[in-house]
Amino acid sequence: MTRRPGEWPVPKADLIEAEPQHQRAGTAEAARFALTLGSIRASLEEQPSESTVRSAARHWTNAIAQLAEEVAAAKRRTG
């Protein structure tokens, strides 16, 4: 079916094509960040005490720093 300009409803495919590529990338990155941070928060909220929350936070911090080092080293090797 052919749609005339300005006709409603706009098919979803047309909306996706109208959205700039960089905007979709930014939206995906924001969503990934929110999901990841939400998962970390859920993990911290499961801890039974203040000290275990801080210990778990240090664990997450160290794990993220280690991942960053691994990714940076891989990028350094590939140029």
Image (cartoon, rainbow, N blue to C red):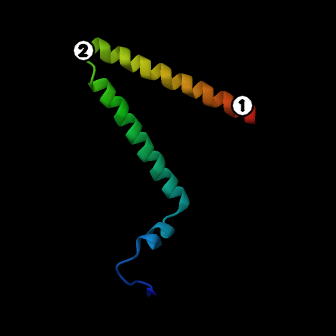
Res 76 label: 1
Residue 61: horizontal and vertical position, in percent?
A: 45, 22
Q: Residue at the spot x=55%, y=27% of the render?
A: 67
Question: What type is the residue that disc 2 sits on?
Answer: Ser
Q: Secondary structure at mark 1?
A: helix
Residue displayed at 44% across by 88% down: 4
- Furthest-top residue in this view: 51
Residue to which mark 2 is pinned: 49
User: Most extreme residue toward the left, as rendered?
Assistant: 48
Q: Where is 17 relative to 74, above or below?
A: below
The N terminus: image quadrant: bottom left
Say whether disc 2 or disc 1 marks the residue closer to the N-terminus. 2
61 left or right of 54 in image: right
Residue 17 against residue 38 in the figure, above or below: below
Label 2 environment density (alpha carbons within 10 Å; few <14, some 14–19, many ≥20): few
Residue type at tag 1: Arg
Residue at x 39% of width, y 76% of height: 10
Label 1 neighbourhood size at 10 Å, few (<14), some (14-19), many (20+)?
Answer: few
**Tally of numbered tags:** 2
**Gap between marks 2 and 1 measured at Cα:** 40 Å
Q: Quadrant of residue 32?
A: top left
Are the two marked residues, 2 and 1, in contact with CB atoms closer than 8 angstroms? no
